[in-house]
Amino acid sequence: MRDVLDELLAVWQAGGTAGLSTVVRTMKSAPRPPGAAMVVSPDGSVAGSVSGGCVEAAVYEVANDVVAAGQPELQRYGVSDDDAFAVGLTCGGIIDIFTEAVSRNTFPQLERVADDIAAHRAVAVATVIAHPDDRRVGRRLIVGTDSRHGSLGSPRADDAVGDDARGLLLAGRSAVLTYGPDGQRQEAGMEVFVSSYAPRPRMLVFGAIDFAAALAQQAVFLGYRVTVCDARPVFATPARFPAAEEVVVEWPDRYLAAQAEQGSIDERTAICVLTHDPKFDVPVLDVALRLPSGRRAGYIGVMGSRRTHDDRMQRLRDIGLTDAELERLSSPIGLDLGARTPEETAVSIAAEIIARRWGGGGRPLTETDGRIHHE
C-alpha cells in the first residue's frame, strides 16, 4: 500500500470510496511481492500494480464490483486455474489478491497510518482476509511498536494478532497468519494479512560530487531515505542534491559516528563513500567497518580506481583494520557494467546493493537456471 498511499489518501480525504487490491500471498514465480497494491479511484483511474500487468484488467473489474457491493473478496490467480492464462498470468506463479472498498467509514485509521509512514514510525496493518463469518472479513487492527488501534472482532483475536503483528513488524516482514475463528493459535478458520511498514532503509552518501547526485536519485527510486554528507559547505547544498532527503555539512567520520551512537544505522543501511580522497575516505571507513553488531551497515562501498583501491587498503591496514573487517568493503564500488557516466555508475552501485541484499550473483539470467526471484 505504501506505493499507492498518496492516491488512496486523496480519495479518502475527499470523502470518496476507492477499490484497494493487495497481494497477500505469492507462490512460485510471482511477479510482485506481498504488499504490492493497486488502487481504483472513483473516476476510474488506476495507480499501482499487483502483477506487473498480468492480471490487472481482471483485478480492475473485481475492484469495481467490490466497491459497488461493499463486500471484500479474496481471489487467487495462477497456473492451477483453468482461467489463469485467460487473464494473463503466464509467468507460472500463483498470487492471492484481497480486494476491499476503502473509505472514511471502512478504514477510519488510514490517515493515522499515513502519518506514521511519513514520519518513519514503524506501523503494521492487520486485516482479516478470510473468516467463517463474512462480517469479520475486512476488519482491521493497526499495530505500532507500543500501540494498538481498531479491532478484529474479539479481544482474544486482537491480543493474538497484535503480538504476532508486532513480531513481523520488528522483522520488517509482511505475511498471512492463520488462527481459529476467534484468534485461537494452531487452529484454522481465520486468515489475517499483516502488512508491515517499517521505516524505509537509509543510504548515506559521503562526497558531494556529481556521482552522488545521480546515486541519490537512483536510491530514492529504490525506496531509500538518502543523506548526502560532505565537509565542504560550498558543495554540500540542497540545490545540488534535490533527490536527497537531507544534505549535511560535516566531516563524514564524525557524522557517521554520531548516527551510529543514535542507533540510526542498521543492517538495511547502505553506506557509499564517493570522495576518493584519503583524508575523508579513511576516517569514515574506519568508523563504518568497526561498527559493533546491531549497528553495522549491510552494505559499505567506496569509489576509486584500482590504484586508489590498493593505496586505500594499505592505509586501512596501517590503522589496524583486520582482513575480516576489510572483507566487508565493496571496493571498487559497483558491479562491472562498463559504466562511464554518473547515471550509469549509479545503476552499477544500485545493482550491487540489490545483489548483496538478495544473494544474486550479478550474472546475466541467460547464464543461470533455477529461480529468478531470490528469497
Image (cartoon, rainbow, N blue to C red):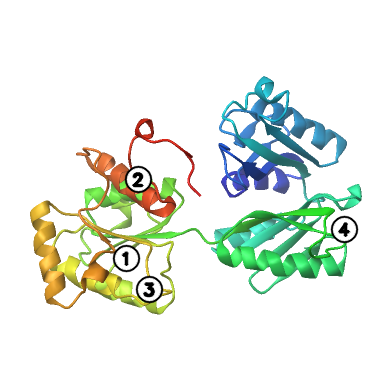
Quadrant of the rendered structure where residue 97 is?
A: top right
Q: Can residue 43 be seen in this view?
A: no
State the separation of the CA atoms marked 2 and 1: 34 Å
Is 360 positioned to the left or the right of 278 in the image? Answer: right
Residue 123 coordinates in the image, percent (x, y): 63, 63
CB atoms at circles 1 and 4 under 8 Å apart?
A: no
Q: Is mark 3 on a helix, strand or loop?
A: helix
Specify few, some or many for label 4: CA neighbours under 10 Å numbering under 14, 14-19, or 20 or more.
Answer: many
CB atoms at circles 3 and 2 under 8 Å apart?
A: no
Does 318 appear above or below 29? below
Of the two numbered discs 3 and 4 on the same chain, state the one appearing first in sequence: 4
Residue 312 coordinates in the image, percent (x, y): 13, 64
Specify few, some or many for label 1: CA neighbours under 10 Å numbering under 14, 14-19, or 20 or more.
Answer: some
Q: Circle 1 sits on which residue? A: 248
Q: Circle 3 sits on which residue? A: 259
Callout 4 amino acid: Pro
Of the two numbered discs 3 and 1 on the same chain, state the one appearing first in sequence: 1
**Which callout, 3 or 4, points to the residue nearer the camera?**
4
Is 371 positioned to the left or the right of 331 in the image? Answer: right
**Which callout, 2 or 1, points to the residue nearer the camera?**
2
CB atoms at circles 3 and 1 under 8 Å apart?
A: no
Of the two numbered discs 3 and 2 on the same chain, state the one appearing first in sequence: 3
**Which callout, 3 or 1, points to the residue nearer the camera?**
3
Of the two numbered discs 4 and 2 on the same chain, state the one appearing first in sequence: 4
Of the two numbered discs 1 and 4 on the same chain, state the one appearing first in sequence: 4
**Which callout, 3 or 2, points to the residue nearer the camera?**
2
Specify few, some or many for label 3: CA neighbours under 10 Å numbering under 14, 14-19, or 20 or more.
Answer: few
Callout 3 amino acid: Gln
Callout 1 amino acid: Val
